[in-house]
Image: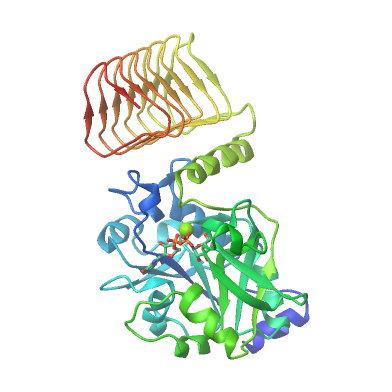
Amino acid sequence: MAGKVDAFVWGRVDLGAMKAVILVGGEATRLRPLTCNTPKIMVPVLNRSFFEHLGGYLKKHNIVDIVLAVGKSPEQIQDYLGDGSKLGVRLTYSIENRPLGTAGAVKNAERFLDDSFIVLNGDIFTDIDLSRMMRLHHKNKATASLAMTPVEDPTMYGVVETDSEGRVKRFIEKPSREMVTTNMINAGIYILEPDILSCIAPDTFSMFERDVFPPLLEKGQAIYGYPFRDYWIDIGAPDKYLKLHHDLLRRYVGNKGIKFEGESFVHPSAHIEGPAIIGEGCFVDRNSIVRGPAVLGTRCRVEEGAVVEGAVLWQDCQISKGAKLRNCLVACRCRIGEESEISDGCILGDDVRIGKGSKVSKGIKIWPSETVEPGTILS
Ligand code: GDD
Ligand code: MG
């Protein structure tokens, strides 16, 4: 690390030689049915796989050597992402025979790691400044550094208590409400020294948050937490996945903007209100309304008089005449029958069929390939 410490002395950290391990495992239960057929790292965000965003973030920080620690569906991920060259990064795969947990997965990738390295949860979208984090890591001569971010409800995350110098005092993973002492949580980004790998048992399930960091703290190791106020979200829950779309649409397309990703047909009487992204080959028919923030995947059809508002549609969906969708998530190839209504917070898996005149009430999840008979009221 000598070169990097020198760089720090000059106030500049080159992260280019660093490797990043992205954790790509777990069951992604909360995102089902979207993740029944699609691993969380591949779910589309603004019509690009989530990995493209995460890889782009690392690349922006000059980190192009990425180890994907994969616990599930390795073939699907490898087929899709390949060696990463299309995205300008170098991907190496470290595959687990069975889920090894967040720390076990990194231990499993030990042969690819020989210097300070970064670990990222594979489901976070953030602007956190990795260079700044690296500077602080060096300054504190930390064994482990972790980014912290404030959240409204820490009970869904890992709470991190630090002292006035930023040294971590305690981790409380998924605390009950009474146990919450701070709203600063583990943002799922670590900088680790390679020595830490000797503290993780090989081929054994273990988690940084519960099994590795707390005993290291007891041994007096230097673990530091750094609060960041930059944008951060974990897409692991559907409301957050939808929120990320809405936030990014406002950021990249602008409040009233409409971005066409290729040629599409929009009838002159149709009304598209930004921010919206319309994938290539869409068909938006007469008197229909697409009201942003909204995303239509490639080849979606919004037929006459249909309304799509605040929703995210994956590719090849058909919204038939007069149907209405609001703030919902619709995976690939769904068919929404004429005059049907899909309400806020609903999630439809791939290939769902909703029969004509049906009503799907708030928050209902429909599993892939299910058919809802015409005229059904699901509540
Ligand atoms: N390779 C591999 N193997 N990856 C795994 C495994 C595994 O066995 N288990 C989980 N992961 C990956 C997930 O794919 C995800 O990218 C990351 O590890 C974290 O797992 P989640 O299941 O998403 O955990 P969480 O969101 O409930 O909590 C974690 O993230 C929070 C921030 O979003 C914890 O690290 C919390 O402390 C943290 O606050
Ligand atoms: Mg998560």
Does residue 260 show up?
yes
In the displayed structure image, the side of residue 108 where residue 55 appears, left or right: right
Q: Nearer the viewer, residue 64 or 368?
A: 368
44 in relation to 217, above or below: above
Quadrant assignment for the N terminus: bottom right
Question: Residue 14, located in which quarter of the rendered image?
Answer: bottom right
Question: Residue 201, located in which quarter of the rendered image?
Answer: bottom left
Does residue 278 show up?
no
105 in relation to 249, above or below: below
The mark tally for this picture is: 0
Name the residue at 69% across, 73% down.
162
In the displayed structure image, the side of residue 247 where residue 228 appears, left or right: right
Q: Nearer the viewer, residue 377 or 293?
A: 377
Residue 175, position as x, y percentages in the image: 54, 63
Name the residue at 40% across, 14% down.
285
Residue 224, position as x, y percentages in the image: 66, 77
Name the residue at 55% across, 27% down.
292
Quadrant assignment for the C terminus: top left
Name the residue at 27% across, 60% down.
73
359 in relation to 188, above or below: above
